[in-house]
Amino acid sequence: LADEPLTGGLEPRLGDHHLRTLTITGFPSVTFPGLLDELNRLAFEYRWATRAIMLDKTDATKLLTRIRRQWFAKRKSVAAILKEVMTNEASTLLDSDASNKAADADTALQELGADYAGMAYVTATVTVWDRDPAVAAEKLRLVEKVIQGRDFTVIPEGMNAVEAWLGSLPGHTYANVRQPPISTINLAHLIPLSAVWAGPERDEHFGQPPLLYGRTEGSTPFRFSLHPDGSDVGHTLIVGPTGAGKSVLLALMAMQFRRYENAQVFAFDFGGSIRAAAIACGGDWQDLGGGLSDDSDGGVQLQPLAHIDDPAERAWAAEWLAAILASEGVAVDPQAKEHIWSALGSLASAPPAERTLTGLAVLLQSQQLKQALAPYCIGGPWGRLLDAEAERLGEADMQAFETEGLVGAGSAAAVLSYLFHRIEGRLDGSPTLIIIDEGWLVLDSPDFAAQLREWLK
């Protein structure tokens, strides 16, 4: 396995790296899963190897029986036994430690007999290395400090250094004679079954570096990618208690996403949490509800019918208007659809500035349909937002839509549906990130939920 020369001795070297190894020789009285997980927080590389030579039931029974007999015999000293023989009186003082260990061996025998656990000869070593022997020794000292802090007994290898290192390599079952027997339950608690996941080195879908680097509890940096398995699906859910920083993470993701070529970001914000990030990146932050905007000239203005001279846009507008009418309690029957389509056809020939909801209402032949559209026209509660003669909506690569004043309003479905349509028109294959902050609020809107379900498919 080594492609460099190994120099033996009390302080072996592999190539130009000095090797330092310690072996665990004693174990605490109680173990639990992840007992040595603190090693994952050390700020340097190390090699933690656990070799287990499993014993069959017969050999394990013989071993535990011998250990129990040895500890049971140590309960009384030779002097105490002689005194019992001479005085014919049982000694009242016993070695409690030996008695407890004999009982522990007896418990291990019971677990073995019930097939609850087995026994194994275990050799656990940790190897560190460095070109500077002093640095290698300091690394070993830090490892020793962590392990001994968990009530283990360790020995830094000297005479046995080469054998200890060889015993940590796969296939070397005889090197390193230090192999105390322990239960397989304790072995499961001891072996390194977990570590800090560092994340993928690249975003395989984009073929570029990960989205961002994060800091973990230890020294291992975390590489965050929206496509960790190379899939083209990057759906992500962020959950956590109030004030934990979910919105801050979303803003960071939005800013970092711009590292990809031709990337575009669409964020449905709540409470202005992404406002600073959007403006700082040269993007557009648009207050759809008007509750947080300080614009004196009206803020966002939408013109959903501006491009109905295109047949595809006209078909979409017919469905969009039918949904609005249905939300106002109007039965959208074939006759109503005919009125809508006829009015859209007439309006399509008008100049773009006249393709408004007010212009459409004038052309409708049904008074009932006109009344249903009245709240969305100029003079209605939502006319300022949806009945503009010229659309005022940003075209930057980073778009943030503030929804706090919109969620729960009667115009929410119409506005969000139109924005979804605009976003879909910009999905040209470029890397696109769609963020929905406070999703539990916007999902209360059936239209928003339906659109989100379609995007997630």
Image (spheres, helix red, strand yellow):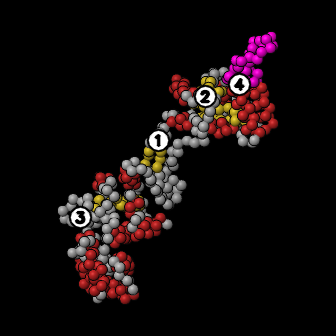
Separation of marks 2 and 1 at Cα, in angstroms: 26 Å
Image spot of residue 334 (x, y percent): 39, 87
| Left or right of residue 10: residue 196 | left
- Secondary structure beneath dot 1 equals loop
Point out the stretch of residues depicted in magenta.
70-97
Horizontal arrangement in the rendering, residue 20 relative to residue 234 (left or right): right
**Alpha-carbon distance for marks 3 and 1?**
42 Å
Residue under label 2: 152
Kind of element beneath mark 2 = loop
- Against 162, residue 319 (above or below) is below
Q: Label 1, on which residue?
A: 216
Nearer to us of marks 2 and 4 is 4
Where is residue 396? Give x, y as percent: 31, 61
User: Which residue type carries mark 1?
Assistant: Thr
From where the camera sits, is residue 345 visible? Answer: no
3D distance between C-alphas at marks 2 and 4? 21 Å
- Of callouts 2 and 1, which one flags the residue occurring earlier in the amino acid sequence? 2
- Residue for badge 4: 99
